[in-house]
Image (spheres, rainbow, N blue to C red):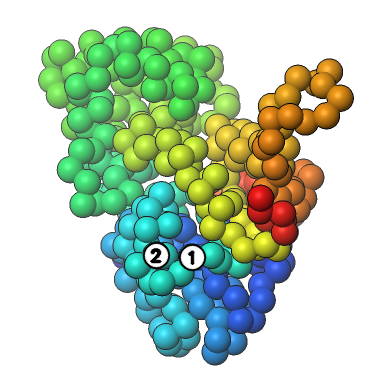
Amino acid sequence: MEFSHVSVLLGETIEQLNIRPDGIYVDGTLGGGGHAFEVCKRLSEKGRFIGIDQDADAIRAAGERLSRFGERVTIVRSNYCNMRQELQKLGIDRVDGILLDLGVSSYQLDSRERGFTYREDAPLDMRMDQRQTRTAREIVNTYSEQELFRVIRDYGEDKFAKNIAKHVVAARERKPIETTGELVEIIKGAIPAKVRMSGGHPAKRTFQALRIELNGELTVLKDSLDDMIDLLKPGGRICVITFHSLEDRMVKSIFKTNENPCTCPSNFPVCVCGNKPKGRLAVKKPIVPGEEELYKNKRSKSAKLRVFERIENES
C-alpha cells in the first residue's frame, strides 16, 4: 500500500513558520513528507531540513518524496522526544523552526494490518514504531480493570470507561482478545444501544486511549515541548497541530507558561521569582481548517494549530 496522507492545515502552517531561505527547520513527525516538501521548496542551497519519524514506512515514503532536495535534507528514524540528541549528532545547536503534526497518518489508519482502525478486523497492534515489542493486545489482555478504566477515562474521555473496562476483563477471561473486531464488539456491548445510535463510532474513544497509552503520546509531548522551545533561535517558531482536546490543552498550557512563567503571587508589586518569558504566542487563538479543507478532508475536522515564537531575551 502506498504511503498517503493529506497534510492538514498545510498552507497555514507554512505561513506561520516564517521560513527563512537559509534557515534550519525540523519536522518531528515527518510522516509522508507533505509539510516537509513545502518547507524544503522554500529553502536555498544553504538551508537545511531535518525530518524525524519512528515509522519505517514514513521514512521510506518521505525519503522518496524529498530526494530532489539532495543534501539539504536529513531524515532520522527516531522519536521527536530525542530531537536535541539527534540534532547534536548533526552538529546543530539551534534551529529556525520546528513542526509537529500529532495526528495518526491516513496510511496508518487505512493499513488494516497496523491495527489502528476500528472499522476493519485486524490484529490488535497500534504501534507507531514497529521496533517496539509491546502492542495494544498486551494492554487489553494484561492491564487490570482499574488500569483499563484509567486509560479509557483519561485518554479517551469516555463516560462509559468503567463499563467498557469491566466488559473487556469479563471477555478476556473466556479467551484472549486478539483483534480489533473482537474489541469493537465488546465495546458495543458495554454502551447502551440508544447512545450507540449517535455520536460517532462507539469504539473511537477507546481506540484513541489505547493508542495514546501504548505509544506514550501525551508523556512524550509533555516532556518535549519545553526543550523544543529552547532549541529555537530568537525569532524562530514552533508550530504544533493537534487532533484532540487532551493534546491541545497540553500545548496551550505549556505555550502560555513559556510566555508568562512568573510564579509570584498576583498581589506582588514586582516579580521576584526571576522567571523570564521565553517567547510569545504568535497567534492568540488556535488556527482551524477552513470550509474548503473540511469539505476535501473530513479527517481535518478536529485539527488545531498553535504557534509559539522565541524572543530575543534568553536570560
Q: Secondary structure at mark 2?
A: helix
Residue 17 in which image quadrant: bottom right
Taking the spot 55% from the left edge, 66% from the top edge, the residue there is 95
Q: Position of residue 163 (x, y in %)?
A: 39, 10
Q: Is residue 29 above or below residue 258?
A: below
Residue 32: image location, x then y, percent: 44, 66
Judged from the image, the secondary structure of the residue bearing numbered disc 1 is loop
CB under 8 Å between discs 2 and 1:
yes
In the image: residue 35, left or right of residue 107:
right
Which residue is nearer to you in this view: 162 or 298? 162
- Amino acid beneath label 1: Asp
Look at the picture and state if 5 lies above or below 208: below
Residue shown at the point (32%, 62%) measured from the top left: 77
Up/down of 183 relative to 122, above or below: above
* Residue 1 position by quadrant: bottom left
Q: Which residue is mark 1?
A: 93
Pointer 2 or 1: first along the chain: 2
106 on left or right of 301: left
- Alpha-carbon distance for marks 2 and 1? 6 Å
- Which residue is tagged 2? 88
